[in-house]
Image (tube, grey):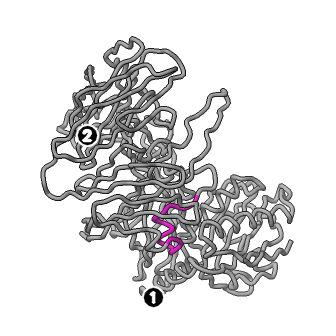
Amino acid sequence: MPQGDNDTTGGNETIDGNETIDGNETELEEQAQRTIDLWEGESRLLLILVHPTDSSPGLTAAQAESIMSDVNDWYVEVSAGKVWFNWTITDWYALDDAGYSNQNAYQAAADDGHDLAEYDRFVVGLQDLTSRSISTQGVQHYNVTTDDATIHLLASRCDVKRFADTNSTRNTMTHELGHSFGLSHAMFNGSISGEVDSYGNQYDSMGSSSTWRHFGAAYKHQMGWLDDVQVELVSQSGDYTLKPLEDDEAHALRISIGMIEEVNNGEVTFAEHFYYLEVRDVQEAETNKHGEVLPGALNGVIINHASPQGQYGYHKWLAIAQDATPETPTDSSGDFLLPEGRTFSIDGVGIHITALNVTEVETTVHIEFDDGLSNSAPTISSVEATSAGAGFQFSVDAQDADGDDIAVFWNFDAEYGALYAPERIGMGTSTEHTFADDDGRRVFVRVSDMHGGEAIDWVDINGYVNQAPQIQAMTPTSVEEGVFEFQIDIVDQELLTYAWDLGDGSTSILPAPLHEYAEDGNHTVTLVVSDGEFSTTMTGYADTADTENIPPVSDAGSDITASPGETVILDGSASDDPDDYPLAFLRYTWSSPDGLEISNHDEATASLVAPSEPGTY
């Protein structure tokens, strides 16, 4: 692959230096095609290095070259050699306030003799500047105004804050360049409050991964880095094979769930949604500052719901990872894979996914499409534990009235508040396990018929006596007018189920639901918590009027002039809450009276595509 030249190393964009002009969809189509062109072959990249005027450059030329070389090598690996960068690195420019709201970094590079029109990609490395790391979504039109001319660019652009010779800089750069390929964040649908974490998938560099992780199957498939053979379309019941995305023989699966109704700006549309199944190389367990071993990555199947995002002019997925083990609730993706012996059912479409055999080399799953017949859940006759050497031999006797095959999953040691890890689980009708101590405990078994039916039972060992869960506190916290977050403090040794009556006819099975009341009043809230044997109930109140709160001050930023089809950044990060009540952070909601579709509308920084018709919006 070509090497970089050296003159001396989620986001979306603001638009400066552009004027609104008459236009139509051809500009958007041009941007879309240039984005697609980046998915294969060489990209010409200019890295612009910037440091504050009161500081000195913190990187040598060799260090900057090393950063760029490492990022290039990573993209060559992840794309299986389909893309690479031909890069140039500028000298250092002493500039203040060189973030996305300003052109001065580009102007400095142009004044220094760099022909900006030659490049497909730009990266601005901001040393010691805390402007947010951010990127265009794919390629965008952009004008840079210098003393001599206006330079028109059709390229992707991104900023990387705190640019230094660190792994963090390399990780951030790969993430932001992912956006410039046209990739969305790798999200996670949490099972604590039900909110989607925009960066929640820690197995994906477009998510919250602290290490270099390959892009997910949906995103690789979008760009053609995995083809239709490597991402097999499944439409019939049967057993299928998965292989890690990091391997040369990577193999993933996709399942259509049909045309889904969507409402965008009051307009009803239909789009085909898919579920993508993939497996990854296993990460090693880590050691924290207290010397405790953290659970390693649970080797299982990642299940992503992929929905199309049509506003950019090219085929684009938004991938949201699903929690396949919601009984160990989490808002991060540390425990969301489908482990061996478990079944995940896609709500409302009659598709059931069971992990049959999970290894580091190859994973087998059974996918079942409902045949329209009724299904009876399996039954468990007995669960036994007998001493076997230093541990126990566990066995379950289970039957299925429909004659379906069964899958069996054991939870040996995951208590309330804990997550599944390889040393805490087992599978099969008979399995051995050795515990680290002789404490009394309850071992749970789940039996699935792989058609959506499941039975749960348990066996107690070492003299364990179960106690009912204790709800020590239930705290409804007002997060904004009429909206409450329900936090609970519980003492128990088992995984629990939750049943909320929120007092207005609404219910929830989440541990800490977020709920908006349509009518003011003092609502009676009831929670029932069960460990499968005993239940505990607590009642509390959510009073929509019982809040003394100074309203936050919203700041949407200055007005923006943009060209049709360009992506415009909406920056509300200057908004403030004078009393930091009831939360120490703000929630954001962007909206448009003119019906413009806004991406990331619930984040401080959102974006939209400028309309094709000139005007004020």
Residue at image coords 43%, 67%: 317
Residue denoted by label 1: 26
Q: Quadrant of residue 408?
A: top left
Q: Secondary structure at mark 1?
A: helix
Q: Secondary structure at mark 2?
A: strand
Q: Amino acid at mark 1?
A: Thr
Regarding residue 529, the answer to whether it shows in the image is no
Does 263 appear in magenta? Answer: no
Q: Quadrant of residue 496?
A: top left
Vertical placement of residue 447 versus 389, above or below: below
Identify the magenta region.
214-226
Tell me, for residue 154, which label it has, or none: none
The image position of residue 351, as x and y in percent, is 27, 56
- Left or right: residue 231 versus residue 207 is left
**Whole-Å distance between the Cαs marked 2 and 1?**
53 Å
**Quadrant of the frame with the C terminus:** bottom left
Does 215 appear in magenta? Answer: yes
Vertical placement of residue 440 versus 574, above or below: above
Tell me, for residue 454, which label it has, or none: 2
**Sequence order check, earlier mark of 2 and 1:** 1
